[in-house]
Every structure is written in C-alpha cells, then in structure tokens.
Amino acid sequence: MSTSISILTEIPEELHESLQHYLDSHPNWDQDQVFAVALSVFLLQNEKKQNPKPSRTYKNCAKVYLEHLFQKS
C-alpha cells in the first residue's frame, strides 16, 4: 500500500453521527478506511464523467478503493 497522509477536516455533525453509527455497527471498519473508500469512490465517479478514457488518476483511485475496501483492520 502507498504512503498515507493525514487530513484534518470539519464535517457536519449529522454526517459525523452517521459515521459513528456505521462504525459502531461495523467493527471491522475504521474512520480512515471509510474516508479513503468514500473519497476514492467520489473521485472515480467524477473522473469517469470528465474523461471517458481511464487515466492514471482513475487507476490510482481504483487501486486505493479496492485496497481499502478489502483491508483487514
């Protein structure tokens, strides 16, 4: 897996509550894993809309998505 970079960000309280509920009911997942998967899916969806031919960025996002989706905590 590639190098990780820490990001500090604010999210709406409702989103945080939903995240906490998800993490409480899915003990095999952690916050970092959820954020990596969510961000990679967002980037995959938007890259595909802008560029119909898969780019290096698209392939990198797909790799991160799959690695984090199947990662064991």
Image: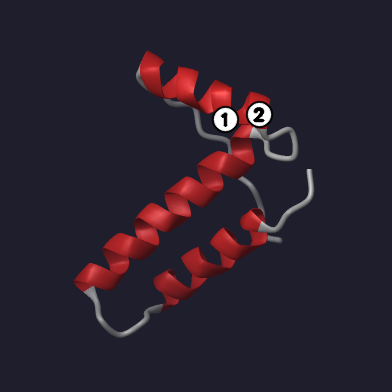
Image check: 57 left or right of 6? Answer: left
Tell whether 22 sits left or right of 28: left
Verify CB contact (< 8 Å) between mark 1 and mark 2: yes
| Label drawn at residue 25 | 2
Q: Quadrant of the N terminus?
A: bottom right
The location of residue 51, given as percent across then percent down, is 24, 76
Q: Is residue 61 left or right of residue 20?
A: left
Quadrant of image for the C terminus: top right
Q: Residues within 10 Å of mark 2 (few under 14, many from 20)?
A: few
Residue 18 spot, x, y in % from top left: 47, 24
Q: Residue furthest right?
A: 72
Secondary structure of the residue carrying tag 1 is helix
What color scheme is it?
A: secondary structure
Residue 8: give its label. Answer: none
Q: Amino acid at mark 2?
A: Ser
Identity of the residue drawn at 28% across and 61% down: 46
**Above or below for 10 versus 72:** above
Q: Residue furthest top?
A: 13
What residue is rendered at 32% in x and 62% in y?
45
Q: Label 1 is placed on what type of residue?
A: Tyr
Dot 1, how many residues are within 10 Å of its Cα: few (below 14), some (14-19), or many (20+)? some
Whole-percent x, y for residue 60 in the image:
51, 69
Task: Give the vertical position of 47 relative to 54 (above or below).
Answer: above
- Kindly identify the residue that appears in the image at 57 percent across and 61 percent down: 64
Count the numbered circles shown: 2
Label 1 sits on residue:
22
Give the quarter of the image for residue 11: top left
The answer for how far apart the CA atoms under marks 1 and 2 are is 5 Å
Instruction: Tell me the residue at 48%/17% (across/down).
Output: 17
User: In the figure, residue 24 lies in which quadrant?
Assistant: top right
